[in-house]
Image (tube, rainbow, N blue to C red):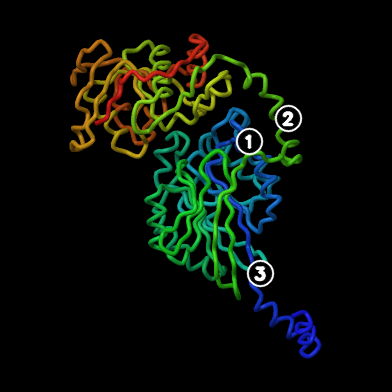
Amino acid sequence: MRKFVAFLLVLFGPAAGLWLAAQAPTHIVIMHTNDLHGQLLPKAGFGGMAEIGAIVQNAKPDLILDAGDFSTGTFLADEFKGVPTIAAMNQIGYTSGTIGNHEFDYGQPALRMRLREAKFPVLSANLTASFTGIKKYTIVSAQGIRFGIIGLTTERAKTLSHPNQVAGVNVSDIVKSVERLLPEVRKQSDFIIATVHLDDDEEQRLASAFPEIRLIIGGHNHEALGPIRLGHTLVAKTGVSGRNVGRVDLEFQNRKLTQMDARLIPVKDVGPDPDIVKILQPFQEKVNAKMNEVIGEATDDLTYSRTGESALGDLVADAFRERGKTQIALQNIGGIRARILKGSVTWGNAFEVLPFQNSLIILKLTGAQLKKTLEHGLLSSIGMVAISGIRAQFDTKRPAGQQVISLLLTDGTPVDAAKLYSVTTNDFVVAGGDGFTEFAKGTEIKDTGILLPDVLVDYIKSRRVLSPVLDERVIVK
């Protein structure tokens, strides 16, 4: 073969070289992440930005993409409002990122600063804000192939983020946004990729509407792991907290896709990238003492559930009710972000359970409002509400509005629809977060100013030993 190539080069000169180059397949490697949630260090042996960096560096990819929610989740990231996260992503060399709903958790001024610090564009074609810095798409070339990368954010971003943090932000229909943008991107691209932070049904709408977008790098659904196929479209996603890195291999012939494969690489037992370790070290030194303070002991794992009662949901709700000195406490499950594992429980562990800077609210709701609130969590994708001070039974086969079949106080007294009850919750749901509406209609609303992680820390300190036991305060038929 080599003799044949040499013969062609002698016979035809540079023209032969061009012909040979046109015939040779082009192999592109894409590495991707999603829902990092500030997990800068390994947790239970998995993840860590220095470890992710080492895997990426070893793969020598052509593109490195992120599908959103790199913000919020650990004290190390949140104490500095995402500065070390962006610094680590810059060092890894991301090609682009995507705006997820949690990018607004530090407030718009902080997000604006992180966008300025990022050495890569952060994308969302269907989201606009009062400040600049968010791009709709980017065009990058790798090995002669032009890639158009379009970012998209879930249409529910405004209800999933704290309403106060997304004032002035507009979120448009994903399909209409791409329809407007696609002709412009198509002219500049050989291959289009969507990096999206979307619900599963939104991903399906996107893939169905635009079969020419053959690759979707996804995020938002923490439990979903890629790759999956939606028609001709490959959807690749990695789960949550950097436990995996995704790799997509593309083969092109004359700039036309001929093959596409994807797989997950667990971020476990990986030697860290020393340059990223060096970047994170000064941030670690500032917070280590507080993060590592032991505040209690767990006799077993405490986990949370979106579909029923959970030991961790019970613990959080009980902590709220005790601190608020109310009859009842309610906590949206979406606000509980991490498990507590068996063994020593640190301040940092408690912070990761409730990482958002929300405050404790005391108010009064009627029994009818309580029922509506509980059913809203049951019927929507946000998950069941964690409760304390009441016992609830649900029947999911009944029509909407009738699924709460029993609601009792802990002493067995039925909750009266017309009577007022004192309730402790958080400012996120009172402001309408996760689509809750009844809290804002309550009376005697008082913001205590006490942050939720501090409530949980104090509660664990007062108990010292945590033994997960379910007491059937929630029963779902």
The image quarter containing residue 402 is top left
Residue drawn at 64 percent across, 36 percent down: 83
Please name the residue that numbered disc 3 is placed on: 144
Which amino acid type is marked by label 1? Leu
- Find numbered disc 3 in the image and state the secondary structure of the residue it sits on: loop
Residue where numbered disc 2 is placed: 282
Residue 444, relative to residue 204: is it above or below? above
**Which residue position is annotated with label 1?**
40
From this viewpoint, which residue is outermost toward the bottom?
A: 11
Q: Nearer the viewer, residue 77 or 34?
A: 34
Q: Are marks 3 and 2 in contact (CB under 8 Å)?
A: no
Q: Secondary structure at mark 2?
A: helix
Q: Judge by depth and name the residue closer to the eye, 326 or 42.
A: 42
Work out whether mark 1 precedes mark 3 in sequence or the reverse, and give the earlier one.
1
Q: Amino acid at mark 3?
A: Gly
Quarter that holds the N terminus? bottom right
Residue shown at the point (45%, 41%) measured from the top left: 223
Residue 85 image-quadrant placement: top right
Q: CA distance from mark 1 to mark 2?
A: 13 Å
Against 399, is 294 above or below?
A: above
The disc, 1 or 2, on the residue closer to the chain's N-terminal end is: 1
